Amino acid sequence: MPFVCAATFRVKKKHLEEFNERVRKHANNCVTKERGCVSFEVSTDEKDPSRFMLYEVYVTKKDFDRHCKAAHVVRHLKATNPWLDGKVQMVGFMNRLTAPNK
């Protein structure tokens, strides 16, 4: 069953430009390099561009667990964690029941 996770967090304003570039590459790497990553979406708050939401979809929970240990993910987190303004808030972990196809 597909597995979904979502998180929100803020990035320090002085790191916004660099974070935006890096997170776009990171999302692309996740989808293209990880067999079980179906989608990795990055959104920003319309009123606060320093507030982000990640929405990730994996084929299985095991694929998400593998994602968390992938070398490119570990490098990304090591580089960007100091740029965060506060803690990451996990919105939820859940099984994806359905999604409309286009």
Image: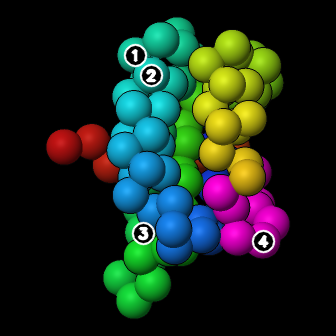
Image quadrant occupied by the N terminus: top right
Q: SS class of the residue under badge 4?
A: loop
How far apart in space, not on screen, are marks 3 and 1 (Cα)? 22 Å
Q: SS class of the residue under badge 1?
A: helix
Label 4 crowd bin: few (<14), some (14–19), many (20+), radius 10 Å:
few
In the image, 31 versus 101, the foreground residue is: 31
Residue at the outermost front position:
14
Q: Are marks 3 and 1 in contact (CB under 8 Å)?
A: no
> Which residue was labeled with disc 2?
29
Pick whichever of labels 4 and 2 is earlier in the sequence: 2
Looking at the picture, how far across and down is residue 68, in whole percent? 75, 27
Asked if residue 13 is among those painted magenta in the image, a careful observer would answer: no
Image quadrant occupied by the C terminus: top left
In the image, 72 versus 57, the foreground residue is: 72
> Which residue was labeled with disc 4?
86
- The magenta span reads 83-93
Q: Quadrant of residue 39?
A: top left
> Which residue was labeled with disc 3?
44
- Going by the numbered disc 3, the residue's amino acid type is Thr
Q: Which mark is residue 32?
A: 1
Pick whichever of labels 3 and 2 is earlier in the sequence: 2
How far apart in space, not on screen, are marks 4 and 2 (Cα)? 25 Å
Q: SS class of the residue under badge 2?
A: helix
How far apart in space, not on screen, are marks 1 and 2 (Cα)? 5 Å
Residue 5 appears left or right of 62: left
Residue at the outermost left position:
102
Residue 35 appears left or right of 4: left
